[in-house]
Image (spheres, helix red, strand yellow):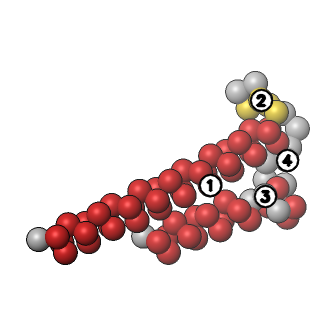
Amino acid sequence: MRKIIGVLVAICYLMAFPPFINLYNRPGFVLGIPTFIFGLIMNAICLVLSVLVLYCYENKRDEDEQKKYAK
């Protein structure tokens, strides 16, 4: 799971660099928000959610290990 989330974080991070920014740097609007700002918001949400999933997974794994050793 750690490797999968690491790859997702890397992909989201790369979306902020100029070669990939062209994907959402277009004229227009999405839901009333300029496309560029919408792309930045989606990129930030993706990064936050992927780190949150990784944190929850690691935290649950640590709790399970502690319960195993407590018995």
The reply to whether discs 4 and 1 touch (Cβ–Cβ < 8 Å) is no
Q: Nearer the viewer, residue 24 or 71?
A: 71
Label 2 vs 3, first from the N-terminus = 3
The residue carrying pointer 4 sits among few (fewer than 14), some (14 to 19) or many (20 or more) residues within 10 Å by Cα, namely: some
Which quadrant would the N terminus be assigned to in this image? bottom left
In the image, residue 20 above or below residue 38 = below
What is the number of the mark on residue 25? 4
**Which residue position holds label 3?**
16
What type is the residue that disc 4 sits on?
Asn
The reply to whether discs 3 and 4 touch (Cβ–Cβ < 8 Å) is no
What type is the residue that disc 2 sits on?
Ile
Element type at mark 1? helix
Element type at mark 4? loop
**Which residue position holds label 1?**
47
Q: Nearer the viewer, residue 46 or 26?
A: 46
Q: Residue most toward the front?
A: 70
Instruction: Give me the residue at 54% from left, 50% from top.
Output: 49
The residue carrying pointer 1 sits among few (fewer than 14), some (14 to 19) or many (20 or more) residues within 10 Å by Cα, namely: some
What type is the residue that disc 1 sits on?
Leu
Depth-wise, is mark 1 or mark 3 nearer the camera?
A: 1
Label 4 vs 1, first from the N-terminus = 4
Q: Nearer the viewer, residue 37 or 58?
A: 58
Q: Residue most toward the top?
A: 32
